[in-house]
C-alpha cells in the first residue's frame, strides 16, 4: 500500500537544520516511531507532500524551507506578561517557570494553549518569546517508511477530531536529542495555536497537576514520536 489520504503511516527519521549534516535536532527510531494518519490535517502540507505515494521500505530525504515549516521569526511574538500570573492560588511563585530559557505553557484570552520561552525576568514582568523554537530554520529530514496501512475508525476519529494522548506541550513523546521538558519541538507542527500564537497580554497560568496547561502539540494515540504531527 502506498501513502495516500487516511492511511496510517509509521516512519523513522532524523531531523537536522541548516544542512542535511547540519546541527542535529531530534530522531525517531523503530522503538518510538512517528505514527500519523495521512491527510488528517495535523501535518505540514509540505511534509506530507514529500511522503505521498511512498510505501513501506522506502527511504526519504527532503528539506522544508522556513515558509513551509515554522515561518520566519517575528518580533511581534515577543511579549511581556505580568509576573503575578505565575503565582498559584495558594500564593506560591512558580520559580521553575521563571528561569531564563524555560519553556512556559500558558493559556491566552481565548483559552488556546501557547508556549513561550523566557527571555528575561524583572520584579514585575516576564518577557516571553512565542516564536516556534525552529522558526526561521530550514529543516532537513531523512528516514524510512516502516509501515503503511488503512487507518482504523478509531485512529481516524482521534486524528481528525482530537489530538490523542501521550504528549505534553512539545511534539515529542519518544524523540531523542531534544532537551525541552515538553518533548521534541521537531519539524512539522502545522498551524497550531500553541507556539505560533501570541498572548497579547492576556495569558494566564492554568493550575493543574502539572502546574500549567502544558500547551502545545499532541501526539497520536499510538504514543509514537509525533514530532511533525500537530495541528
Image (cartoon, rainbow, N blue to C red):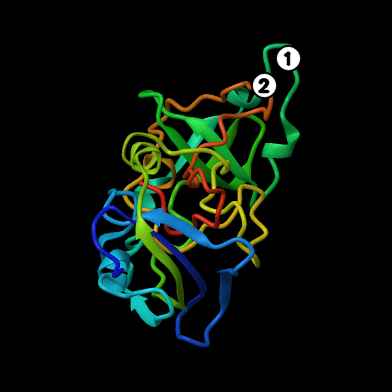
In this view of the protein, which residue sits in the foreground, 14 or 116? 14
Q: Which residue shows up at 48% across the image and 42% down it?
A: 216
Is residue 144 visible to the viewer in this orientation of the structure? yes
- At mark 1, the secondary structure is loop
Looking at the picture, tell me which residue is in the foreground, 154 or 201.
154
Residue located 63% across and 26% down the image = 86
Residue 193 falls in image quadrant: top left
Say if mark 2 contacts mark 1, CB within 8 Å. yes
Quarter holding the N terminus is: bottom left
Q: Residue at x 43, y 59 (%)?
A: 228
Above or below, 94 against 151 in this view is above
198 or 174: nearer the viewer: 174
* Residue 135 visible at all: no
Q: Position of residue 36 (x, y in %)?
A: 41, 54
Q: Could you tell whether 98 is left or right of 109 in the image?
A: right
Instruction: Find numbered disc 2 in the image and state the secondary structure of the residue it sits on.
Output: loop
In the rendering, at what x and y percent does residue 138 appear?
A: 39, 74
> Is 107 displayed left or right of 110 in the figure?
right
For label 1, the residue is 91
Question: In whole angstroms, how far apart are the C-alphas of marks 2 and 1?
Answer: 6 Å
Q: Which residue is mark 2?
A: 87
Amino acid at each position: 500500500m502506498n501513502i495516500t489520504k487516511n492511511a496510517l503511516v509509521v516512519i523513522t527519521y532524523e531531523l537536522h537544520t541548516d544542512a542535511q549534516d547540519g546541527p542535529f535536532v531530534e530522531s525517531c527510531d523503530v522503538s518510538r516511531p512517528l505514527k500519523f494518519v495521512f491527510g488528517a490535517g495535523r501535518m505540514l502540507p509540505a511534509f506530507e507532500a514529500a511522503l505521498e505515494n511512498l510505501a513501506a521500505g522506502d527511504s526519504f530525504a527532503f528539506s522544508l524551507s522556513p515558509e513551509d515549516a515554522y515561518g520566519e521569526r517575528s518580533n511581534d511574538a515577543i511579549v511581556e506578561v505580568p509576573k503575578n500570573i505565575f503565582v498559584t492560588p495558594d500564593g506560591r511563585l512558580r520559580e521553575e517557570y521563571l528561569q531564563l530559557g524555560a519553556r512556559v505553557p500558558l493559556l491566552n484570552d481565548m483559552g488556546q494553549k501557547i508556549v513561550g520561552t523566557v527571555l528575561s525576568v524583572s520584579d514585575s514582568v516576564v518577557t516571553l518569546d512565542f516564536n516556534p523554537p525552529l522558526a526561521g530554520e530550514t529543516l532537513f529530514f531523512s528516514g524510512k517508511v516502516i509501515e503503511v496501512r488503512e487507518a482504523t475508525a478509531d485512529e481516524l476519529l482521534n486524528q481528525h477530531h482530537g489530538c490523542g494522548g501521550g504528549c505534553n506541550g512539545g511534539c515529542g513523546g519518544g524523540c531523542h536529542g531534544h532537551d525541552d521538558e515538553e518533548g521534541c519541538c521537531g519539524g512539522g507542527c502545522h498551524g497550531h495555536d500553541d507556539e505560533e500564537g501570541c498572548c497579547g497580554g492576556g495569558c494566564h497560568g492554568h493550575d493543574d497537576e502539572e502546574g500549567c496547561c502544558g500547551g502545545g502539540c499532541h501526539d497520536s494515540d499510538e504514543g509514537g514520536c509525533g514530532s511533525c504531527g500537530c495541528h
